[in-house]
Image: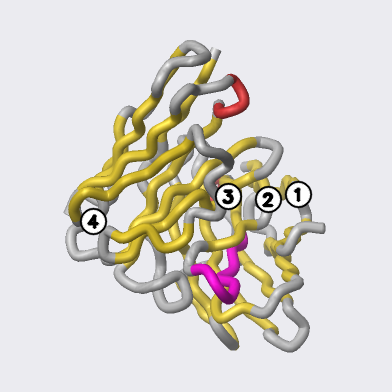
Amino acid sequence: DAGVIQSPRHEVTEMGQEVTLRCKPISGHDYLFWYRQTMMRGLELLIYFNNNVPIDDSGMPEDRFSAKMPNASFSTLKIQPSEPRDSAVYFCASSLWAARFGEAFFGQGTRLTVV
Amino acid sequence: KNEVEQSPQNLTAQEGEFITINCSYSVGISALHWLQQHPGGGIVSLFMLSSGKKKHGRLIATINIQEKHSSLHITASHPRDSAVYICAVFRGGADGLTFGKGTHLIIQP
């Protein structure tokens, strides 16, 4: 397996534009997590899915953020409209078990810059 | 106060030195993870602990559940160990991880 695949690797967009980040988890993993990393706050959990169903989205900063997982092999994180403070690295991770049991495998991240 | 505190924030050492990175947490947990983030940005899981000690090569991780503390040790450190080391805990109620701010380690040749 190629691991968790995220696209794009880098995204630069203007304030107000819609941004869509994509993630393909490792085949067979039941859990998918979206994290955001900034210098100020470090890594933060945004949302996670179990068997394609969103379980906890309490980390999503506001209504401008939405995430979907239409099937077991694909998830998106959308920001609409984007703002400069959304600039961060966004990581997707997947795991076979919940975080209490097993390791999570991370994608390479998407570095988002909103100007 | 952050739920997960790491120390030191930054550490520079010479090749061959024994390295210790500490992690303290304030919530009840079921598991603690140590992650490594390379300069290129990729994140790799090193250990998952719920008790005791684990060893992998030159890396050793320990956890004391009663004291809410974990340490990551690197023996015979090497420049390729230079990375950010992140402690993360699984906290009750959510299956995601709560992260420390990371320890930026530089090993000089």
Badge 1 marks a residue whose secondary structure is loop
Q: Distance between the residues labelled 1 and 4?
A: 32 Å
Ranked by sequence position, the earlier of labels 1 and 2 is: 1
Badge 2 marks a residue whose secondary structure is loop
Q: Position of residue A16 (x, y in %)?
A: 49, 15
The residue at which mark 2 appears reads as B101
Question: Which residue lies at the image location 35% right of the left edge and 29% below the top edge?
Answer: A20
State which quadrant residue A101 falls in: bottom left
Q: Position of residue A43 (x, y in %)?
A: 58, 48
Q: Residues within 10 Å of mark 4 (few under 14, many from 20)?
A: many
Q: In this view, does B97 lie above or below A88?
A: below
Mark nearer the viewer, 4 or 3:
3
Q: Where is residue A96 in the image (x, y as percent from the top left)?
A: 30, 69
The residue at which mark 3 appears reads as A44
Tag 4 near tag 2, CB within 8 Å: no
The residue at which mark 1 appears reads as B9
Q: Residues within 10 Å of mark 1 (few under 14, many from 20)?
A: some
Query: Are labels 2 and 3 assigned to the same chain?
Result: no
Is residue B60 visible from the viewing direction of this image? no
Q: In this view, does A22 lie to the left or right of B20?
A: left
Question: Which residue lies at the image location 73% right of the left edge and 46% below the top edge?
Answer: B12
The residue at which mark 4 appears reads as A26
Q: How crowded is mark 3: few (under 14 residues within 10 Å), some or many (20 or more)?
A: many
